[in-house]
Image (cartoon, rainbow, N blue to C red):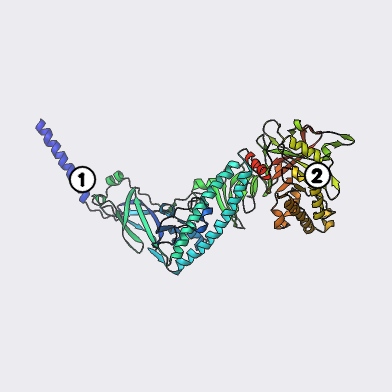
Amino acid sequence: MKSLLGKIFITLVFLSFCWVMGLYFRRDKSWVRSVVEVEMATYYTLESNNAFANDGRSESDDTFENNNVFAGKSKDKFYFSELFVKDRVQDEEDSVTFLRNCALEADSAELRLVYTGLRVSRDAEIQVVLPSIEDTLRGGVLADVVKRSLLRMEEELSRQERYLKELRYYERTHSVVDAGYNEVMAFAMRMKTDFVRQKRLYEALKRHFEAGELMAVKHSRFRVNGVSYRLKGQKTGLAILQPEDLRLRKLALGTGRLQEDLLRYPKKNKYPRWEGFSVCGAKSKAFVPPFSKKQEMEFMRFRDSIGTLFCVKLNEEPLFGTAIDRRGAYYRGSFDEDFRRHGFGFSIDDELVKCGIWQHGRFKGERMVYTSDRIYGIDISRYQHEHGRRKYPIHWNRLRIRHLGTLSDKKIHGAVDYPVSFVFIKSTEGTSIYNRYYLSDLRSARRHRIPAAPYHFFSTHSDGRAQARFFLKKSHLRMTDLPAMLDVEPSDAQIRKMGGAARLFSEVLEWLQIVERATGRRPLLYVSQTFVNKYMEHAPEALKRYDVWIARYGEFKPYVKLLLWQLSPDGRVNGIHGDVDINVFNGTKEEFERWVSYSGASTP
């Protein structure tokens, strides 16, 4: 019995062997063995073997962080994507396409495409149709593109430097308690990283351009089902690929259903598709592929009639996304149904970071949260001592801010019980008016270690020189701690009567310059938000260099660069009878301490 079973077993083994060999050697008239997906990754390199005269750094590199990556190198490579060569980007200049697809690392420059390939032999060869692209690029065309690209890079780096300057100003004057602070700082970190990368790219590309004749060499790699392949041959776009592993080439593979199922080769045909890009903030900004159905439901990307690029998330209420105009100004936040900025968002351009509330395309301002972490102060005159015929003293040892005013809604966290961290006292007005309480108030502030300074109310009836001399004579500036302030509040009629805005600017600037020379400290300029909006754009550059103190009695912080903000004229302070002007320092406690220290005072 055992002998019979052994013979049956041997017979079955032999028949199985014959069946397998039959599958191996059988002939199949079908040309297509199986359908596979071929992933092709390709890029170009610009290589330079010239030793550079220096260590790879420019003289200006000390102004940038982490820019010494080329130190000591005599040979470096510059990579760019095949996307530039294929000219797949519509309505873009070749230099723009080139720049948006270049990198200092091969992985970052690779363009990955997936094609449908056909497995056509038992030794695992793949046949696939690939686009014809030059293996090498050289000559005047390439050099011309690189030259124009360098000019564009210089413009972009200059723009990014201006933006980073504005973001540093925002960081100095804000803290985590401010709405949108984390979003702005995250954007600043991304821009800083991008700036360093762009600077490195610029330096590398410039060295290649200056080294002489340019030549770019194409590099490609292929993968099929996770296996690395190499190009065996290519003719008129038809390419033959074979595995890089020699053992795979020797595999005897048939074409039957069994082998296809075991090897899991898909039979469905797929069109070439883009990979390596995201919907917004793409790895390569030069081209964003068509959205999938799911992405089409979530995002909409388009340009409007003036060239602003929008990327808006549709399943948000209200609409939310980003917008970048032709000049590079960036916005991230909410939109209305007409895609105007509406609701909360922040923008960055050459002028200012605006983070706050927008209303149908107009920036309303930043709605601050008032906490004990902020720095508050007051400004006073004789009206804090006289109410009608009655006179009141100021109890300096009891000063505490207890109310921020009633003229606007304010978002306050916790109880209002803030120390008075600085005080400005009216000293003079015009060429004849002097505050009789000024000197005693100044002495009291100094005695209670509250940083103090005088201010002068500017008159349109006399020239700036005469008013400055009167102010210097009466203000005892040797006793002051902070820079003096010039209060400029003329009406439109007063400005016209004195000869127009140009005349006003001239007289105001003369006052500021005279006081600055006399004290060695740059005075502050106090104006209203309305004055800024209407007149300051036309002011001379010499006037714009002075720090401003803005009066705006609304719920929104003024959207200009400022040092102090007068947020209400009707605040309440323990120790002072009646209403008091309440001011807030535009910055953190650390910034305030640096400012006071620079001014020569000691903080209370």
Nearest the camera: 115 or 370?
370
In this rendering, position of residue 206 left or right of residue 160: left
Q: Nearer the viewer, mark 1 or mark 2?
A: 2
Residue shown at 13% from the left, 33% from the top = 5
Q: Secondary structure at mark 2?
A: strand
Numbered badge on residue 427: 2
Q: How many marks?
A: 2
On the image, the x and y values in percent for residue 116 come to 37, 53
Quarter-of-image position of residue 596 = top right
In this rendering, position of residue 529 left or right of residue 16: right
Residue shown at 62% from the left, 54% from the top = 350
Q: Is residue 406 visible to the viewer in this orientation of the structure?
A: no
In this rendering, position of residue 326 left or right of residue 400: left
Numbered badge on residue 20: 1
Quadrant containing the C terminus in the rendered view: top right
Quarter-of-image position of residue 231 = bottom left
Looking at the picture, does residue 146 appear above or below residue 3?
Answer: below
